[in-house]
Image: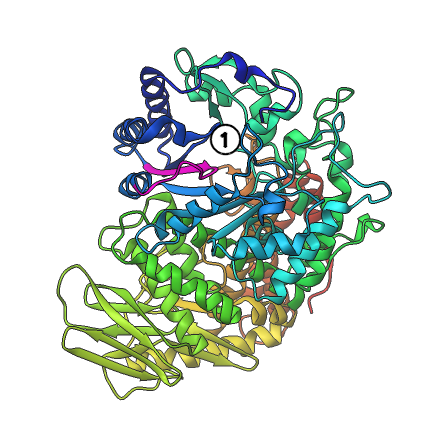
Amino acid sequence: MYEHADQSWRTKARTMAPHTLATAARRIAEHAARWQLPGVRVVLHGGEPLLVGVAGLRSALTELTTAIAPVTRLQLLMQSNGVLLTEEFCDLLAEFGVRLGISLDGDRRSNDLHRRFANGNSSHAEAVRALELLRRPGYRHVYAGILCTVDIRNDPIAVYEALLEHRPPRIDFLLPHATWDAPPLRPAGEATAYAIWLGRIHTRWLADGQPVRVRMFDSLHSGAVGGPTGSEQIGLGAADLVVVETDGSWEQADSLKTAFDGAPETGMSVFAHAVDEVAALPEITRRQLGLAGLSEECRSCPVVGQCGGGMFAHRYSTARGFDNPSVYCADLKELIVVVNDSVQVAAVATEQPAATALTDLIDQVGSGAGDERAVTYLADSQVAISRALVVAIADQLRGHPYAAEGWELLGDVDRRSPAATAAVLAHPFVRVWAVGILRGSARDGDAGHGYLCAVAAAAAIRARMSAEVPVPVVGGRLHLPGLGTVVLPAGAAVDVADVVSTAEGFTVRHGGTVVRVDHGGESGDPRWLPVRTLVAPGIEVLLEDADPHRDCHKWQPRQRLDVAEAAAWQRSFAEAWEIIEAEAAYQLPGLRAGLRAMVPLEAGPAGELRASTSRHAFGSVGAERAAPDALAVMIVHEFQHGKLGVLLDLCDLFDTASPVKLQVGWRPDPRPIEGVLQGTYAHLAVTRLWRVRAARSGPGREQAAAAFRQYDGWTRAAVDALRSSGALTPVGERFVDHLAEALAAPSS
């Protein structure tokens, strides 16, 4: 940053004064309290933060922790060149739970291009010494990873191999800061030199079995299936960063220093302005707009969902400000195509903008169903989101007595058997648990962060790996997601047992209690309660009556069913499936691809049937056991809600800031746009079911005809209201047009 266009650092203090830090900490705490934020992330940056010394750093960490930790979860991070790192610093970082990243650009030759002392000497040996220190068992949990700035003059494979030698938990590759006015180094005739450089590493990384998390690649993989990117460099996620300079000035991201002198300035300071005032600045709000905040060229690009226009600073030109694509536009496009091809995601050629994956998805889901490919895409996107959520949880394990063991095991399973990890992350209630942790809304008595060990154990068991990990026991029950529950002697509200996975099965040890289970869930021990399944032609789903996180539906879930009740559920499900086959066959491919679990709910009052879905539990349907014809309607209706919820995770069908509310037939009160979309989409499927039933002769025809007329009228009126609301985005208009077409089409 010292060499870039903004040189304001020359006029600022080298370190932050204590009263400035105290004021900044108070402002952060006030903001977190006002908005009830579940957590905040504070990064100690520089310059070089270790220059303040051990005493100065302790004072700063104490100030931040004292002010912020009572209000919200505080996550502390630091980026350093590592030159000054000592055991004393590491002990201090461990004490306060600070995660430390080291800047290193590869082997000595590569690193020496930019990272030298003022006298010209190499700093490589000192950085390597710091990394060796962080790899010690006592400091490993402090080690956040390595930040590597790309220089295409270096050999990419040599850089990659040098970084791997230091066994980082994560690698961040950073494109060198540049703008259209000051473009990056680029050999003549090589329009995509950075894509080629990174693409070579990506190919090798895949061939090695993804031995380390690489944020850029993980982000592109996640974005390819509609998941979050979690990176400032790519993706459409809202920027949530603000900088406090040493003099207390609020500034935008440091990367903007590459644009022009004064680019990061806001004219505000911690002494006079609250965080809300900074957040309301146009320069900040533009970076919250997603697609709408990009240039016209970016908005029309078929890979914009993954690219997101690139880093904001890299879009700058004197002529048009930030209303440009990234100066790395060609590189990002090419890299995205390479990544998508490698993970067998349908990459979209830039010459065919009308055939984007998103358009295909809108067309398929908007038809009222979605074929197997479309719903598989929706389901895969949820796995990507769950993975990102679990990664975020792994960054909060400070002070937990054993959860880090689960994170380490999960990473090991993911490297050896990614399919086993994906299968567990696809379980609907893993995301429910993760969202609860990250929102700070986990209930008293829950396993909390420790449940990460249960997730890891379930993955290891699926992979048939040899492993041992402590797993929480809550209320005498140890649950393995998607597999089952072990009933153990009740002790403390939250206890711990050891789960040992082998090629033959797994064993749970808790004090003197030992429970052994073979693969396939076989065990003669009555303390093992395997998750039961419901089976129908072409589908097998879990009957979830014990998962501790299944209580995410609108109604109270049933407790563990007895044998007779489970058998009754099997009969009802099989008969309901036959009805769906006869009356809504177009729904079958999507249901087979996406329905994973049924959650039995407590029955409602006489005449009231209960069923629901949860936004964070795609693939699960909660329902009370009902007559098969009613259960068929409930399954189809609720699965519609689930599909649309995922689609809304992937794209904006409406202006989320719109205050518009619409009157609908099925509710007495005006509904917000999302509620109308959800109701319309669910009722579309129900309308088509009743139309089929109304066309049949025999008992119940008049009742079916009346139900059809009611649902058809409600749905058509809602479609008309949505079309005239002015709140739909272009893709939302396309989606609603498909709903109208599906209403007019004959049932199939």
Mark 1, residue position? 241
Q: Is residue 36 left or right of residue 153?
A: left
Q: Out of 87 and 343, give the one closest to the viewer.
A: 87
Which part of the image, by quadrant, shows the C terminus?
A: bottom right
Residue 524 falls left or right of residue 37: left
Residue 358, can we see it? no
Judge the density around disc 1: few (<14), some (14-19), many (≥20) Cα neighbours within 10 Å: some
Question: What residue lies at 28% left-to-right and 31% top-to-bottom?
Answer: 58
Please determine whether, in this image, residue 118 is positioned above or below residue 453: above
The reply, left or right, for residue 99 in relation to residue 237 is left
Question: What segment is highlighted magenta in the picture?
Answer: 73-87
Q: Where does the image place residue 240, in percent across and percent down from the top left?
A: 50, 33
Does the image show residue 216? yes
Residue depicted at x 74% and y 57%: 347
Q: Position of residue 110 (x, y in %)?
A: 62, 45
Q: Specify the quadrant of the image occupied by residue 721.
A: top right
SS for dot 1: loop
Query: Residue 432 location, x and y as percent?
Result: 40, 55
Residue at far bottom of view = 524
Count of all numbered marks drawn on residues in the image: 1
Quarter where residue 91 is shown = top left
Q: Position of residue 165 (x, y in %)?
A: 51, 57
Q: Residue at x 32, y 38 (%)?
A: 89
Amino acid carrying label 1: it is Leu
Q: Is residue 83 magenta?
A: yes
Q: Foreground: 242 or 228?
A: 242
Magenta stretch containing residue 510, yes or no?
no
From the viewer's side, name the closer residue of 48 and 742. Answer: 48
Q: Which quarter of the figure is the N terminus placed in?
A: top right
Q: Is residue 330 above or below residue 222?
A: above
